[in-house]
Amino acid sequence: MEETSTMPDAAVPAVPAVPPTPPVPLAALLAREDLGLRQIAGPRDPATVIHWAHTSEMADPYPYLLGGELLLTAGVHIPEAAGSGTYFDAYVPRIVEAGGAALGFGVAPVHDTVPRALVEACDQYGLPLVEVPPRTTFSGVARAVWQLMAQARHTELRRVTEAQQSLAAAAARPDPVPSVLRQLAQRTGGRAVLYAPDGAEVASAGRLPGAGVEVGAALAGLAGVVRPATEGGSGGPTPSSASDTVAGVHLAAYALGTGQGFVLGVAAARRDPGDHTIASVGAVLLSLLTGEHQSSTGAARSSALVRMLLGAAPEEVAALLDPGERWVVVHARPDGPAPDAVAASALGAALGSALVDVAGDVVRVLVPAGHREPAVQPGWTCGVSAAVVPREWGVADTQAARALSRARATREPVVRHGDRPGLAGLVAPAEAAAHARAVLAPVAGNAALLETLRTWLSLHGSWDRTAVALSVHRNTVRQRIARAAALLNTDLDDPDVRMELWFALRDA
């Protein structure tokens, strides 16, 4: 006979931000007076749940079951002599082996009563047996399962939404980290712990269910699984989250997105479908709260930024920022539309810095050097400066801008400013600057000519690539180069002239 099945959307992987559809307790289905269902055999466990309903008249339904079904049958497949034979001793164990949650037997039109041998087999093999009265159709049972699932899903979504709101409110309190942990513990009915990079507990809330010491140690160990490996470690990929069950307690650990090694651990006696979503929201909030701006280094940088905004020069705030600390400047342009604040913040997070500026179609990011090397960012074209101390930020900003122009012209995702020593290092900086002023004096007052000449020389005299880098027409590039050659009174086709101008432009 043809197989039919009713399955909820939860059979397909759900969107991470939305909890999956909760299963339906068998007791809730039995409580529906409009169905008139009655359990007549098997264990009466309140924890028995149904994930969907499935109708089959196959003598062996095993190949068609996924597990968690309420299997509905009218007994068409049962031979006449089944009552005195071993038919049900083969039929019922196959349902149990496939993971069926319960068996629903429809009385009429094939059988007037549920076969006694089936009742005995369900008692023997521990399969709940439900009698479906003649007035109740299988489609009515399936519809009731769907309705109960829809109600449960609505309830769970409302619970998750309320939890998100309470977590956001907690993050805005004067004591945000303990407040968020208290809300997590309350919403999950367990204990929430924030672990430091060294594994120590920073803060916690709630009580550990069950065996506290054993569960506490297991949760701390699970946190170590998701904590980023330190330098010199195995270097293998680290999961962002992990889960386990110890002594009947559900454990979960989430690596916070700061990259500093903080971990959120959650232990609860039960695991509802929306708990992962709630814990994930808490992890995002704690990632923001434990970010670099909360550290002493972040506070110093914030103070330095305020002072500069109020008129202080970089040299004056260098001591506050640690004069020996080095930075790189990154200029980036998106491959698509002009960047907005969200896209710029995401880029800054990927580069490891919250110091982000959006200026038209270019995003500038000030990144502490040494934490992570600016790498290729999908969807962006980037120019990276050399590592400099704070008083040289202006120079690095210019280097990053030039590197971005070259990256766009060469269609490279990332171009870094060349900072390795060369011939220019043989000339004292003061003498090189004086030479540059003398050579470039005829065009010194024309910024457009200087930038066009610099870009054109860096791209080996390519008109098209220079036009792309400067976002101008190629004829404009030709006109500017011709004008520069005339003012400089030199032949730009001469490689010696080009080399001299290039060294001069590097110090301009």
Image (cartoon, rainbow, N blue to C red):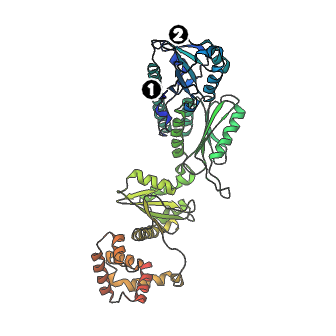
**Could you tell me which secondary element the residue under label 2 belongs to?**
loop
Residue 507 shows up from this direction: no
Residue 239 appears in the figure: yes
Total numbered circles: 2
Residue 167 vertical placement versus 323 (above, below): above
Q: Is residue 504 left or right of residue 484?
A: right
Image position of 155 with respect to 255: above or below:
above
How far apart in space, not on screen, are marks 1 and 2 (Cα)? Answer: 33 Å
Q: Cβ–Cβ below 8 Å for labels 1 and 2? A: no
The answer to which image quadrant residue 319 occupies is: bottom right
The disc placed on residue 150 is 1
**Camera-side residue: 285 or 45?**
45
The answer to whether 279 is drawn above or below residue 37 in the figure is below
- 234 or 374: nearer the viewer: 234
Occupied quadrant, residue 469:
bottom left
Quarter holding the C terminus? bottom left
Residue in view at x 65 percent, y 46 percent: 225
According to the picture, the residue beneath numbered tag 2 turns out to be 112
**Which numbered mark, 1 or 2, is in the foreground of this view?**
2
Name the element at disc 1.
helix
Seen in the picture, residue 338 relative to 294 is either above or below; the reply is below
Query: Residue 129: image x %, image y %?
Result: 58, 17
Mark sitting earlier along the chain (1/2): 2
The spot of residue 461 in percent (x, y) is 38, 80
Residue 355 rendering spot, x and y as whole percentages: 46, 56
Mark 1 residue type: Ala
